[in-house]
Amino acid sequence: SKEEEKKKKDGDKDDDKSSDAASSSAARRLVNQSLLDESDQASRSFFVGVNVLVLGLAFFWLFANSFHVTDTDWIGGLWGLIYALIVMEVALVVFLYYMVKDAGSSVRKSKRMEEFAKKMESKSKGLTPEDVGSITVEEYGWLVDGWSPFWADGAGDNATILSAEGKMLTKEEEAVASRIDALSKKVGSDVPDKIREGARTALFEGYREYVYLVLNLLAFYGYFACIVTEYYPDEATKPEYVHAILGWMTNADAGWLGNAVGDFAWSVEPIVILSSPMLAGYMSPGEKKKEKSE
């Protein structure tokens, strides 16, 4: 019997070593993938930031137009405004692309979270080695209710941190490995509910992006109509496709309506941006439970 107990202990030790090795391997893979994702996100942020700068500079002429400054020869006059609108339209195409991409991505993410939450309901005794081996950065973040490694905080700009980056990276891997090892033993009963709550938030964010898309499409078309009316001032010689673009309206009507639609869309958008956190908080199940308890 002593020999059997010894074999059992040795077997348990081997299992622990195997589990630790799997956790460490998964942690290294997740950290590396997270670094690659962060690099891609940084490139996108830089590109979007440049477009925001361009859009902001061009917006100065739109602001000046509200005070009829463009009716004078200052800052380029009317054609200065038209050229600024063209620059804004080009920059806006980039934002429209990312709105379509982000909206679809958030809706699909919500569906993945719902499926993953359902899968985790049967994992109360812990993740299997197959689960650990196939876990993604996204799924790991859902399991730990948000993963924010040191490089995601923008702390890498500090010279001291840069010099100690190797040690911090090792610590991050160890922390991830430790959490994966804990998850391989037990997955909390509240994890599926938290993931589902995140799924609802992702779905809300996706629909909100679609609202942004509609508003910015309206702004794009409205200001585009203003540009077209200036390039085709003669009603009699306007090509038929230009008449169609302007909805067969006169230049005066198309210019006025286009400017009004653009101004309206870009006035409503900030309201949506500012009110969405409050609306998302109200829709949160945790917030509703709090209200009921009060």
Image: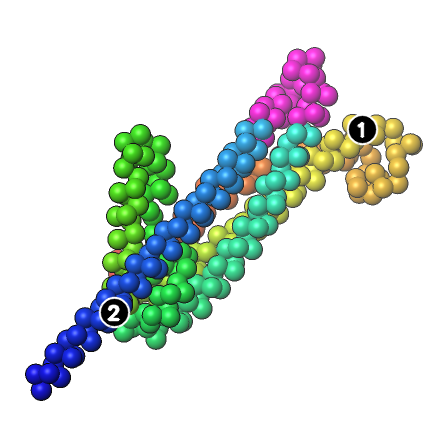
Q: Is residue 196 among the parts visible in the rendering? A: no
Q: Secondary structure under badge 2? A: helix
How many labels were placed on the picture? 2
Q: Which residue is mark 2?
A: 185
Q: Is residue 163 among the parts visible in the rendering? A: yes
Other-residue count near label 2 (Cα within 10 Å), few / some / many at <14 / 14–19 / ≥20: some
Q: Among all residues in the image, which is located at the extreme bottom?
A: 1
User: Is 168 on the left or on the right of 52, as rendered?
Assistant: left
**Residue shown at 49%/44% (left/top)?**
40
Main secondary structure of the magenta stretch: helix
What x and y, as percent, mark residue 242? 83, 38
- Comparing 117 with 40, the one in front is 40
**Quadrant containing the C terminus in the rendered view:** bottom left
Q: Which mark is residue 276?
A: none
Query: Bounds of the magenta span?
Result: 55-84
Residues under labels 1 and 2: Cα distance? Answer: 69 Å
Q: Among all residues in the image, which is located at the extreme left?
A: 2
Contact? badges 1 and 2 (CB < 8 Å):
no
User: Is 111 on the left or on the right of 98, as rendered?
Assistant: left
Q: Which residue is mark 1?
A: 231
Mark closest to the chain's N terminus, 1 or 2 = 2
Q: Within the image, what quadrant is residue 114 found in?
A: bottom left
| Above-or-below relation of 230 to 30 | above
Other-residue count near label 1 (Cα within 10 Å), few / some / many at <14 / 14–19 / ≥20: few
Q: Secondary structure under badge 1? A: helix
Residue type at mark 2? Lys
Q: Within the image, what quadrant is residue 11 found in?
A: bottom left
What x and y, as percent, mark residue 121? 35, 73
Q: Among all residues in the image, which is located at the extreme front?
A: 3
- Comparing 256 with 147, the one in front is 147
Between marks 1 and 2 in the image, the one whose residue lies nearer the viewer: 2
